[in-house]
Amino acid sequence: MSIAENPAAPPTWRLLLGYVRPHRWTLLVGALLSLVTGATGLLLPLVARELIDDLSHDRAITGALVIMSALVVANAALGALGSYVLRRTAESVVLGARRALSSYLLRLRITAVDRSEPGDLMARITSDTTLLREVTTDSLVGLGTGGLTLAATVVMMGLVDPVLLAVTLAVILGAGTVLGVIVPRINKASRQAQDAVGVMGASLERILSALRTVKASGAEHREERTLHEAAEESWRQSVRAAKWSAAAGNTAGLAMQIAFITVLAVGGARVATGAIDIGTLVAFLLYVFYLMSPIQQVVGAITQYQTGAAALARIQEALRLPAEPAAQPAPLPATGAEPAALAFEDVRFRYAEDLPYVHHGVTFAVPARGMTAFVGPSGAGKTTVFSLIERFYDPEGGTISLDGRDLADWELPQLRSAIGYVEQDAPVLSGSLRANLLLGNPDADEGSLTRVLKTTRLDGLVARLPDGLETLVGHRGTRLSGGERQRVAIARALLRRPRLLLLDEATSQLDAVNEAALRDTVADVARTTTVLVVAHRLSTVTMADRIVVMDAGRVRAVGTHRELVAADPLYAELAATQFLATAE
């Protein structure tokens, strides 16, 4: 899904200046070096005219040659230095944009992520930010230095011969009219090209994230067509943008060639009538040649600005997505910290305005300490309870309180520092096993890590791995089994020393032996921590202190296993299905 545009967005030039402002001084130095480079070039035709005059009057030309050589060397050296400074500044602008955008994307609300394509967001932080490099140097600086050099060149041409200047300007004015028609088309085509790149990235991410499913379904060729269609659309739009950019560049080049021919014809006639001498004509023709560079620089700046405007618009769209406030991480709970108490009161929630409600007035209370299990049919709203506790989403109605305090009043880092959360699919990040375990508590000592590894029965796995804790787990933990990934996720949560531990289907992929061991571990943790468990296997919750039975977004019963088997038909049916009706 694409990100909607905001018609009230600030103008592109103001956005660009915002990225450039931190580097304005180095940018100014680069611009000054470019201007000085241009100034040395402007002096060359005048020295050439003097050289021709000296030759025509049999005067020594040594001095003019020395000056001309010095100007050429200075022009090359200053040009190279100015180009380096500008390129370095442009890379710094790209770095700043990527830092800002990546930091913002990490703070996106889950609702915004749900509505966006990850591949498109990745394109905005990679290809779109890259375009800022060109728009900084070729557009912003190019327009300034090229415009000033162009103006200075026109002034020098006027001093040499006003008549030939009028002829030149007439040709340039005609070319400018044509460019005025082309430039808006460059903007539109560039924007469509960048959007197409985002679509292609989204298609690729969609396929790679489920590549095993695609292969198992024999759908490679169908998905290949989808990916190729996205790539071809990107190609079509990029070619269209290139077509208009080429037209703009060729128009400028053609204008200069026409100007040269016209000046040569008119200037030759003026030399024949004695209005000007041959040295003046040569000097003016050199200025015409020299005029090509600043004109092409200005035209290039305008075309790059259109491309950069499209990229900036896409970056700003991402920066307007709803995000959580930036805040410093909160310290984790101290060892032995008091467990948390939780309460839901008439909570109503749906994932989007056009979707049905998931919770229809959910109410329950969880005292500090002990284990509370949530059971019910699929789609009852159990996992949503955990998402609301973590404040990935906010309820539309009712209140959720932790320790008697509304979740909305908690600072997000402080709230989440008190919670350990094991998701249903137990995601593992690419990197080492150690990095995954310490993701939630990078300061955990070796003693704590060793204890948690033993508790979650990962110590045997670590002993078998070739590099122990430093072993790479692969993309999304593909080198680990499903049960091993679950145990890693549980260990990661326990290392945070949570006051509230949320386990969503945390043992669904474990064998019977490891499941029984982890049940004992969770029961032990529940003596000092508040533990909430979501499970479809009732075998994992029969030892819970209380069980919350949910159905169709409502709480229908709360009690112990024995009480619910006798009092709640739904729970009794679930228990009977899993041969737990007689369990104690």
Image (tube, grey):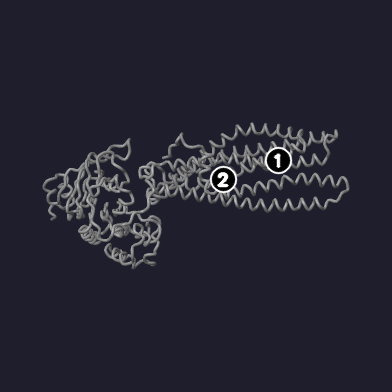
| Residue with the most extreme front position | 25
Residue in the picture at 12% in, 53% down: 582
Q: Is 371 in front, or is 496? A: 496
Quadrant occupied by the N terminus: top left
Q: Position of residue 550 (x, y in %)?
A: 21, 44
Q: Amino acid at mark 1?
A: Thr
Query: In the image, is 92 to the left or to the right of 275?
Result: left
Query: In the image, is 214 to the left or to the right of 271?
Result: left
Q: Give the SS element for disc 1.
A: helix
| Residue with the most extreme left position | 566
Whether residue 112 can be seen here: yes
Q: Position of residue 52 (x, y in %)?
A: 83, 45
Task: Relative to 75, say whether 513 is above or below.
Answer: below
Picture quadrant of residue 417: bottom left
Q: How many marks?
A: 2
Task: Relative to 466, say whether 157 is above or below.
Answer: above
* Badge 1 density bin: few <14, some 14–19, many ≥20, Cα 10 Å: many
Quadrant occupied by the C terminus: bottom left
Q: Is 195 in front, or is 100? A: 100
Picture quadrant of residue 345: top left
Q: Give the SS element for disc 2.
A: helix
Query: In the image, is 374 to the left or to the right of 489?
Result: left
The residue identified by callout 1 is: 153
On residue 136, the disc is: 2
